[in-house]
Image (tube, helix red, strand yellow):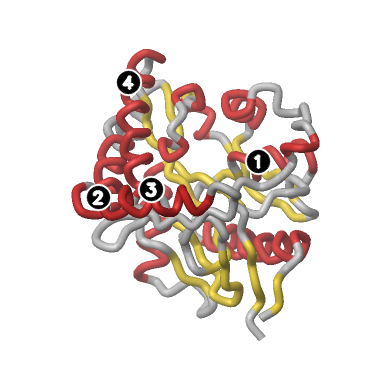
């Protein structure tokens, strides 16, 4: 197998995003680029140069319709598949579209097997910041427990110590709080407030209360340029990006211009 460069990886992710966009437009589903992908569209007109994934979000009603379509109507090309977001064997309370042509390896932990696009549902959030903080503390506790259920193999100098200690946390977590339980709890908390019934909304999967924005932000969409193509984004990306990143047009220091995923992607021969 051939290891992909960051440019080749981004080209493959762009094709994955294009396929997702096609399905959404054919079925009249709303979605928006989000997180680093939306930031890249606004600040760089494409990928953040060091980014190695794609993030989109969908209001919960559209998200559920999308899942039903890909599960029941066989709309995905044969080289694409998806991860479960609930039930036995679940790893995340959101969905990943996976491209089976590109196996993935991570030096830090075992996650999914292939190059992926993340799809986050947008749910309602409490109207006051205090209530959101309380809810997000509960959500973050389950996110942490879910993370402990992963098998970590650190590649840093202290990796062996982390490996030995992490092993016992891994065993205990999978006995007392298996990942399927964590995901079920996270999903229940995320959907505590039905989308469209509250003044505020957010992607609960990120686990940060300050990222909640007025629900109306997720009700209006327009096209935005990304790597020479047009995709959908909320019509007011400024409000969303400020909630997520603060002064988002300011580049980070050079020593922090790197991906947090540490993934290596390969192309099958």
Residue at 37% over, 40% down? 144
- Residue beneath label 1, please? 38
Upstream in the sequence, badge 2 or badge 3? 3
Q: Residues within 10 Å of mark 4 (few under 14, many from 20)?
A: few
Seen in the image, is 44 located left or right of residue 240?
Answer: right
Q: Return the residue at label 2.
A: 172
SS at badge 1: helix
- Viewer-nearest of labels 3 and 1? 3
> How far is mark 2 from mark 4, CA to CA?
26 Å
Mark 4 lies on residue: 134
Local secondary structure at mark 2? helix
Q: CA distance from mark 1 to mark 4?
A: 28 Å
Q: Gap in Å between the C-alphas at discs 3 and 1?
A: 37 Å
Residue on which disc 3 sits: 165
**Counting residues from the N terminus, which is met first, the one under dot 1 or under dot 2?**
1
The quadrant of the picture occupied by the C terminus is: bottom right
């Amino acid at each position: 197998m051939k290891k992909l460069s960051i440019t080749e990886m981004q080209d493959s992710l762009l094709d994955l995003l294009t396929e997702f966009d096609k399905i959404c437009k054919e079925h009249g589903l709303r979605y928006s680029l989000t997180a680093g992908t939306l930031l890249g569209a606004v600040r760089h007109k494409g990928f953040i140069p060091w980014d190695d994934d794609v993030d989109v979000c969908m209001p919960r009603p559209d998200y559920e319709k999308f899942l039903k379509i890909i599960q029941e109507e066989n709309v995905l090309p044969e080289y694409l598949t998806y991860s479960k977001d609930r039930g036995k064997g679940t790893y995340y309370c959101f969905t990943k579209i996976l491209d089976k042509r590109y196996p993935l390896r991570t030096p830090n932990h075992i996650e999914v097997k292939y190059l992926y696009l993340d799809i986050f549902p947008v749910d309602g959030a409490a109207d006051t910041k205090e209530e959101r903080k309380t809810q997000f503390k509960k959500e973050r506790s389950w996110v942490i427990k879910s993370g402990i259920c992963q098998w970590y193999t650190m590649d840093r100098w202290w990796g062996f110590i982390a490996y030995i200690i992490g092993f016992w946390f891994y065993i205990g977590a999978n006995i007392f709080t298996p990942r399927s339980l964590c995901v079920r709890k996270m999903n229940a908390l995320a959907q505590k407030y039905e989308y469209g019934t509250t003044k505020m909304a957010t992607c609960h999967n990120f686990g940060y209360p300050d990222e909640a924005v007025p629900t109306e932000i997720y009700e209006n969409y327009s096209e935005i340029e990304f790597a020479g193509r047009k995709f959908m984004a909320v019509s007011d990306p400024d409000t969303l990006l400020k909630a997520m990143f603060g002064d988002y047009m300011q580049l980070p220091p050079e020593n922090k211009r790197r991906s947090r995923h540490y993934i290596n992607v390969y192309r099958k021969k």
